[in-house]
């Protein structure tokens, strides 16, 4: 389990020459070299960092091409206007308005170009993705379907514009938002985690795995723990612990963690240890309405009633 520092940093820059534009993009995405561009560009870029997620929005009257060294991160994007180009591994990919995409594998060099774009990107470090699905590899640059791409982008916007600005300083909310975004990305883009578990994971999915995982979850529910943390505590792979929970408890490890946290929230409500909204955020719920629905399903009453009767 690792300590995490949650940052909420927003920066907006405006540039009017190619060298400045290249410097801004270099700082955001890694080492890149300007190949060509139009004179007198005008570009705005706003950036927000929430924990280990980075959201950028770039727009303006600018056309440039850059060569980019391996970024070591996953960078996904959505084009709102203009055109975006990426080329790697001998393949050229053009992205038009309304399309979502993966730029390039983290360990690949590529060529990137923008043409008067309104471009949004989401950067996820490799270890953050591996905490949800260990050893994941993406098998394509486009979403599985237009509907999958639209659902992914809707999740990104919801987290970026609604959840994180309000609850980004709550560690469990920020951590849950990160894992929701990774899970939505894995569901939207083709990758090797969509297949079945290997035989070794099926062998490890036994009751001892569940017992070790449960003991760890119940001792650490107040902390930001991941599926990778739970798997390490159970001494198996992420897929094995997920399979063990499905096989023996008919739920995922993270669903069990949510159930434990809901029980902790119930105890806080009975002790009148804060408002409903405060308690919900303390235990990882950004939206009180979702917390109320889950609480009512588990305890048969609204959380406000438990608070008043505590």
Image (cartoon, rainbow, N blue to C red):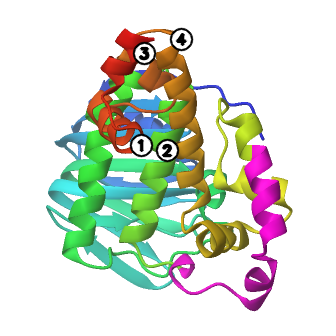
| Image marks 2 and 4: residues in contact by CB distance under 8 Å | no
Residue 38 lies in the magenta-colored region: no
The prevailing secondary structure element of the residues shown in magenta is helix
Distance CA(mark 2)–CA(mark 4): 30 Å
- 243, above or below 5, in the image: below
**Dot 4: what SS?**
loop
Select label 3 or label 2 by which is in front: 3
Asked if the stretch drawn in magenta spans residue 193, the answer is yes
Q: CA distance from mark 1 to mark 4?
A: 18 Å
Q: Work out how far the residue at label 3 is from the one at label 4, CA to CA, in angstroms.
A: 13 Å
Q: Position of residue 2 (x, y in %)?
A: 76, 37
| Disc 3: which residue | 278
Q: Is residue 123 left or right of residue 37?
A: right
| Residue linked to disc 4 | 271
Mark 1 or 4, nearer chain start: 4
Q: Label 1 crowding class (10 Å Cα cut-off): few <14, some 14-19, many 20+?
A: some
The region drawn magenta spans: 192-216
Q: Farthest residue in the bottom direction?
A: 199
Check whether the beta carbons of the residues at disc 3 and disc 1 lie within 8 A of each other: no
Disc on the earlier residue, 3 or 2: 2
Q: Is residue 231 visible?
A: yes
Question: Circle 1 sits on which residue?
Answer: 298
Can residue 57 be seen from the camera position used here? no
Disc 4 crowd, CA 10 A, few/some/many (<14, 14-19, 20+): some
Q: Quadrant of the C terminus?
A: top left
The foreground one among 225 and 22 is 225
Residue located beneath label 2 in the image: 178
Front of the two marks 3 and 1: 1
Q: Quadrant of the N terminus?
A: top right
């Amino acid at each position: 389990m690792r300590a995490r520092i949650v940052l909420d940093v927003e920066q907006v820059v405006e540039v009017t020459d190619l060298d400045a534009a290249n410097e801004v993009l270099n700082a955001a995405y890694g080492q890149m070299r300007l190949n060509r561009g139009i004179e007198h560009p005008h570009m705005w870029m706003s950036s927000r960092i929430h924990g280990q997620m980075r959201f950028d929005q770039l727009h303006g009257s600018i056309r440039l091409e850059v060569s980019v060294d391996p970024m070591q991160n996953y960078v996904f994007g959505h084009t709102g206007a203009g055109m975006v180009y990426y080329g790697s591994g001998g393949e050229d990919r053009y992205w038009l308005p309304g399309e979502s995409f993966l730029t390039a594998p983290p360990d690949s060099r590529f060529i990137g170009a923008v043409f008067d774009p309104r471009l949004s990107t989401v950067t996820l470090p490799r270890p953050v993705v591996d905490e949800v699905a260990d050893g994941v590899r993406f098998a394509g640059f486009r979403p599985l379907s237009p509907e999958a791409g639209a659902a992914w982008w809707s999740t990104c916007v919801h987290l970026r514009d609604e959840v994180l600005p309000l609850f980004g300083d709550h560690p469990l909310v920020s951590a849950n938002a990160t894992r929701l975004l990774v899970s939505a990305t894995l569901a939207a883009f083709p990758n090797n985690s969509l297949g079945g578990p290997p035989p070794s994971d099926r062998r490890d999915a036994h009751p001892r795995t569940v017992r070790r995982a449960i003991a760890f979850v119940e001792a650490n529910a107040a902390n930001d723990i991941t599926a990778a943390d739970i798997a390490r505590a159970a001494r198996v792979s992420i897929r094995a612990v997920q399979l063990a929970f499905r096989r023996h408890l008919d739920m995922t490890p993270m669903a069990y963690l949510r159930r434990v946290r809901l029980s902790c929230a119930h105890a806080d409500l009975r002790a009148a240890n804060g408002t409903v909204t405060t308690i919900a955020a303390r235990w990882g719920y950004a939206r009180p309405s979702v917390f109320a629905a889950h609480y009512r399903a588990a305890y048969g009453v609204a959380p406000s009633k438990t608070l008043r009767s505590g």
